Amino acid sequence: MSAPDNTATPVASDGPENERGITGKGLSSGTVGLIGAVVIGISCIAPAYTLTAALGPTVSAVGFQVPAIILIGFIPMLLVAFGYRELNNRMPDSGTSFTWATRAFGPWVGWMAGWGLIAATILVLSNLAGIAVDFLFLLIAQLANAPGIADLAANPFINVVVCLLFMLGATLISYRDMQTTQRLQYFLVSFQVLVLLFFAGTAIFAVANGNGFDSSALSWEWFNPFAVTSFSAVAAGLSLSIFIFWGWDVTLTMNEETKDPERTPGRAATLTVVTIVALYLLLAVSLLMFSGTGTGEFGLGNPDIQDNVFFALAGPILGPLAFIVSLAVLTSSASSLQSTFVSPARTLLAMGHYRALPQKFAAVSPRFLTPGYAVIVSSVVASGFYAVMRFISENVLWDTITALGMMISFYYGITAFACVWYFRHQWFDSVRNVFFTFLFPLIGGLILAALFFITLIDSMDPEYGSGSSVGGLGLVFILGLTVIIVGIVIMIWQAIKHPAFFRGETLSMDAPPSHRGRRR
Amino acid sequence: MSGCIVVGYTATDAGMDAVALGSRLAAASGAQLELVLILPSGSRSVITPPDAGYDRYLNDQAAKWLADAVAAVPDGVAHATHIRYGDSFADGLMTAANDLGASHIVIGTAGDGRRGRHRLGTVANTLLHSAEVPVVLAPEGSRGTNPLIGITRITAAVGTRPGAGTLMGEALSLATVTGAKLRLLSLVTVDLPPSVDTGVIEIAGAAHASNVLSTARKSLPADISSEVVVARGTSIEDAVQHLSWEPGEIAMVGSSRLATPRRLFIGSTAAKMLHELPVPMIVVPRTQNTSEGTQR
């Protein structure tokens, strides 16, 4: 056997070797191909889950103009994603928004950006698990041919218990970093897409045969955002459509992880978004054609079905095959639960690492090499949140989705401005920089900021969204405000207890200098 | 010895057990100690988006963990640390062992209850099936043993199953480099079917015992003593239970001993033996390839 190349004297180990492993097949660099990136992108977005959760609330805001809102909702997402990409290339860090906003605006804003991200993902975790519970019962009901079972999901106690079990399972999987095989994941994503196509196709077919519930002829007006009557409605619709694209940015920000960093991220992002937008438009159009926006039993305007439309419509459209929609949504929620868990856990880890939170959050499980403590905390908070909401909200899924749109606008907006401000010395280094570090993120950030404030103000109305209210104020408003105030309180508490981060000792503000000798 | 000792390290008690035992072996044999920490490679992540930022963090953390491990290595033992990537702990460890030219792979087996056993199950299972070099299993608590105690005695359980020759060779070479006494446990009595007449078993046992002992005496240096005992009981687990053990002792068995037709249970056999054994166990693969550049 070959002798090791080290000398026989004890080596004072000051770190790992760097020659092999790390650049070669180590880390994540160069491991993701185009298809892999698209699969991760689609499975993060989880179109089956997002659409069933968001379609109803969007219809209630903008009526038939859902397709228009989906199309324009993509614009702020795209603009902000460009900013994300610039920041990620410059400062790849698991803290993402938290780290970047701290670098640009200092610890206080950075902390709140991190908080926004965590709050948003915790909201979506509880919503995901809630949707999964509905579909689990529906699937059992469909397979057992006993419709009564599906109604069990409406019992808050059963619902909460099953939901907590789901969360427990997802937590274990995330904590132990269990991954499926690539083949299985490719299969699940293809299955999800094919089922949605089939679902939409069957709905259109039914309408063509005169079997629609409330057949509505397709109209180009549906694609015209100006046909929406009020600006508030557009804002409400937009903040929902931001949610449906959320997660797409991972394809764009996967950079050094891809086999060909020059081309793969761009192509993967394009391919993913074309797939997703096509799928969303097709489904939105087909379901609008089938159900109309009325408030009848299967009308998309019926508040009873709006928080989970596939749940209500799969049966009437697909008949005995309805269970495949349940399966698609379940698998989509399951893989999305796992990828979603990673996001707050990594941010919490980064915040712990930079002492913005107690250092416990920075702990990595030595056995499973995951941010173990952060995963468990996220899970406990999301579970507790869901349990409380299930009892105080008339329509928990709907309200969480709306509040989620607001929180995404909040932290994406801050991130977009962070990009603009961080690169302030480099704006005019090149034409490319003018667009990607200045104009695009600035416009995206302004749109999101506007959305955030409009949603916040509008949601004070107790009739907003699902109509849940506490003390005469809309529940969504209470939720959004509570999340932000709790964030501020924890931030101040941490600043008093462990001020190092807030003094800029652990993560300093920065702005890279211009590469030009002198600026124009 | 012809290679280095690779320790599969995790920042757990089991990992520290492995470091302590690896240090002991290295100190006794004068071999180089290679502490290897395996991180998950990015290619296994198909659901969660890979994150280079987190990977870097993990890498830094791994370096700190390895520094802790190094602190436990006694002075005078030549050592180096490595961070490697693999689809699994066992997979990464075997690749590293190949690259580094390992003579032994050391892993810990301590664990908290069921999960610990499971871990021994999967990692040990994979290693025992696929590793080309002997795998050393450090029982829970090895970290409490003074690494400088060395290896005082080696007990090799030699039977007639395939691989016995390889095991014998391995035992002799380890005894030679460490200067440990060699105790040979003849398993012929265990290997013969129970239907065989007791008298015949006794005769066969005595013959096998004297046979292996003379082989050992021939190849061992004059100053290393060797003895032979004939196993009692119906299984190897039984046989080791009846023996006395020195604190600095190491047991050696061939992997064919642990292999059962239902391969999934190999880990539990190993776990059961470790439970019986108060000392570390070296499992020698059936066909050991000692040439350089071995490939899986």
Image (tube, rainbow, N blue to C red):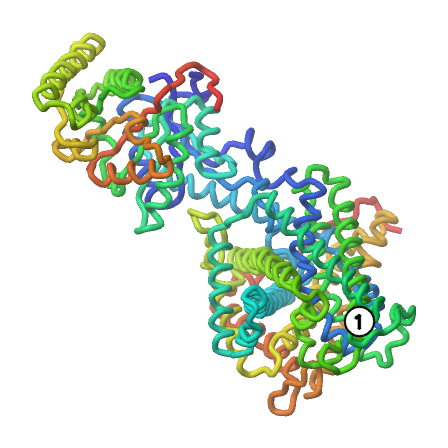
Horizontal relation, residue A64 to residue B33: left or right:
right
Q: Nearer the viewer, residue A497 or A477?
A: A477
Q: Nearer the viewer, residue A464 or A206?
A: A206
Q: Determine the residue positioned at 46% across, 36% down.
A: A14
Residue B89 % position (x, y)? 45, 38
Q: Nearer the viewer, residue A348 or A305?
A: A305
Residue A171 % position (x, y)? 49, 59
Horizontal relation, residue B6 to residue B227: left or right:
right
Q: Determine the residue positioned at 60% across, 68% down.
A: A131
Q: Considering the image in quadrants, where does the N terminus of chain A appear?
A: top left
| SS at circle 1 | loop
Residue A107 in view, yes or no: no
Q: Chain of mark 1?
A: A
Q: Which residue is mark 1?
A: A211
Residue B287 % position (x, y)? 37, 19
Q: Nearer the viewer, residue A181 or B147?
A: A181
Please tell me how many numbered marks the rendered image carries. Answer: 1
Residue A125 % position (x, y)? 58, 65
Q: Residue furthest top?
A: B218
Image quarter of residue A421? bottom right
Q: Is residue B272 above or below residue B114?
A: above
Circle 1: residue type: Asn
Q: Residue furthest right?
A: A220
Q: Is residue B121 above or below residue A167?
A: above
